[in-house]
């Protein structure tokens, strides 16, 4: 199989700043991933539906508006409803460390705060994909 | 979720979009998908009408596809969209951004959008995209739309894959049309002059139709449709043009011919891919290594190496 890691980069909610999302999307593309970019102002419903149709491995969310404690749980809920149980939900933005901890405890993947390097994000996704492949072949 | 193909096929038959998406991935990844699963899917296909949209970057293809899809939805037809973007030959990555212009279709249950990267198109983009189209067709979509940037080989693939090929241009395309006319100009069944509210649109249309009239007269003369996709102008004219082309194909029995050609092309491509896989066994690779080793003294040549490899392949077939 010639599998490629497919990542959805999405921006939920009302904030209209997608510079960060675009930087991440380009960095992931340059790392050899297939990146589906959704554009601005997506609802959680839209994001999960895109993830389903595109059969992505990873959903990466960029939130700068402060609504992360509502949006992440809602996306997780919808992912469960649609059976996307082997898809990684990760993301970043202006998210305080204590909120990131809470979200991770709820079951999201790693949450990246301001100042995270794109290399760290790439490495995190690669390692996640590798460990998943190992569990799949078992 | 399991990747068991039989289970996927079962779910697919009950209308599961998740199973559809997973089957498409299996095809894209050259995954293990038994031929009887492929057969089952193929035999269900053959109903959908396939339309290809191509043109230079920034011509407004995605926006146009978005509008035309909404128009088909109003007619009660279901639509599958395959949006193709290039894979970087340097990193193998791809940025697939066509969905940005199709956001209002995401939650429509009668629409399924899949972004595809060209992935070096070993075995041809056309075969992969066509297989994906076959699956969407088997899933019950009435209309399949391909969207691809027309700057290289991919636009020729689209002609094979589509029943009707729409080339989307903008008033500013004038000069680039000259550069690309060998490719884009010859493949169009329909031209769209998008962003036609811009200055120079009428002149661009005149120039385009002048070029078209220079060609030998054909049974089907590609019409030029004026559109402003963002304002939903000209969409009905485009629908009419597509319908007219469909009727033309039917009257002249060209639809069957296109489907036969597509079938032949798929068989050719499958045979060469599968033969290649069987051909390069352990022994064949060793033979090639030996020839490479003899290269410094010019004791070999590509011709001799190829012939020896083919002889070896024939022998191993005879032994079986």
Image: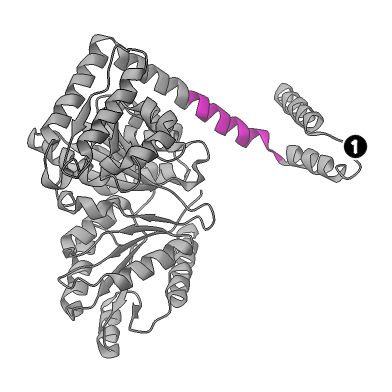
Element under label 1? Answer: loop
Q: In the rendered view, does A54 fall on the left or right side of B286?
A: left
Viewer-nearest residue: B96 or B256: B96
Question: In the image as oriented, which residue stretches furthest toward the bottom?
Answer: A98
Q: Position of residue B304 (x, y in %)?
A: 81, 29
Does B282 appear above or below B43?
below
Viewer-nearest residue: B139 or B269: B269
| B164 within the magenta span | no
The main secondary structure of the magenta stretch is helix
Q: Position of residue A2 (x, y in %)?
A: 51, 50
Quarter residue B23 falls in: top left
- At x 35%, y 77%, the residue is A110
Does B285 appear above or below A20?
above
| B269 within the magenta span | yes
Q: Position of residue A72 (x, y in %)?
A: 22, 73
Q: In the rendered view, does B268 fall on the left or right side of B235?
A: right
Question: In the image as oriented, which residue stretches furthest toward the top?
Answer: B252
Q: Can see residue B36?
A: no
Q: Which colour style is shown?
A: one colour
Does B154 appear above or below B320?
below
Q: Position of residue A94 (x, y in %)?
A: 26, 82
Quarter residue A81 falls in: bottom left
Q: Give, as a single range, the part of the protein colored magenta.
A: B267-281
Q: How many other residues sit within 10 Å of disc 1, few (<14), some (14-19) or many (≥20)?
A: few
Q: In the rendered view, does B91 fall on the left or right side of B289?
A: left
Q: Can see residue B48?
A: yes
Residue matched to label 1:
B299
Viewer-nearest residue: A61 or A86: A61
Circle 1 marks a residue in which chain?
Answer: B
- At x 26%, y 35%, the residue is B204
């Amino acid at each position: 199989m010639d599998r490629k890691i497919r990542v959805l980069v999405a921006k939920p909610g009302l904030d209209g700043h997608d510079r960060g999302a675009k930087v991440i999307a380009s960095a992931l593309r340059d790392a050899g991933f297939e990146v589906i970019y959704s554009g601005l102002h997506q609802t959680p419903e839209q994001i999960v539906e895109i993830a389903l149709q595109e059969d992505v491995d990873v959903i990466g969310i960029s939130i700068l508006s402060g609504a992360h404690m509502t949006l992440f749980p809602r996306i997780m809920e919808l992912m469960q409803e649609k059976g996307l149980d082997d898809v990684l939900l990760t993301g970043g933005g202006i998210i305080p460390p204590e909120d990131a901890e809470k979200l991770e405890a709820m079951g999201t993947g790693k949450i990246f705060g301001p100042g995270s390097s794109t290399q760290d994000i790439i490495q995190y996704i690669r390692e996640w994909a590798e460990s998943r492949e190992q569990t799949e072949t078992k | 979720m399991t990747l068991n193909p039989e289970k996927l096929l079962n779910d697919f038959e009950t209308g599961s979009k998740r199973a559809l998406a997973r089957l498409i991935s299996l095809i894209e990844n050259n995954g293990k998908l038994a031929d009887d699963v492929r057969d089952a899917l193929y035999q269900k296909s053959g109903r959908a009408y396939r339309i290809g949209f191509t043109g230079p970057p920034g011509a407004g293809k995605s926006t146009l596809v978005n509008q035309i899809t909404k128009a088909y939805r109003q007619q009660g037809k279901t639509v599958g969209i395959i949006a193709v973007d290039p894979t970087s030959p340097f990193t193998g990555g791809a940025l697939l951004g066509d969905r940005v212009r199709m956001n209002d279709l995401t939650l429509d249950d009668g629409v399924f959008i899949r972004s595809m990267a060209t992935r070096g198109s070993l075995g041809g983009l056309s075969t992969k995209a066509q297989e994906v189209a076959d699956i969407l067709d088997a899933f019950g979509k009435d209309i399949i739309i391909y969207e691809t940037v027309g700057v290289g080989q991919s636009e020729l693939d689209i002609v094979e894959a589509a029943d009707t090929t729409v080339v989307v241009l903008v008033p500013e395309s004038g000069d680039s049309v000259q550069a690309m006319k060998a490719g884009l100009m010859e493949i169009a069944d329909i031209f769209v002059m998008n962003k036609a509210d811009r200055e120079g649109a009428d002149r661009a249309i005149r120039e385009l139709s002048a070029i078209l009239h220079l060609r030998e007269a054909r049974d089907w003369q590609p019409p030029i449709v004026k559109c402003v996709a963002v304002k939903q102008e000209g969409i009905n004219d485009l629908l009419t043009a597509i319908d007219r082309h469909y009727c033309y194909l039917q009257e002249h029995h060209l639809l069957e011919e296109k489907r036969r050609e597509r079938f032949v092309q798929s068989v050719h491509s499958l045979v060469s891919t599968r033969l290649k896989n069987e051909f390069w066994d352990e022994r064949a690779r060793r033979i090639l290594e030996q020839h490479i080793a003899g290269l410094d003294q010019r004791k070999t040549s590509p011709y001799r190496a190829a012939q020896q490899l083919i002889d070896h392949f024939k022998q191993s077939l005879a032994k079986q």
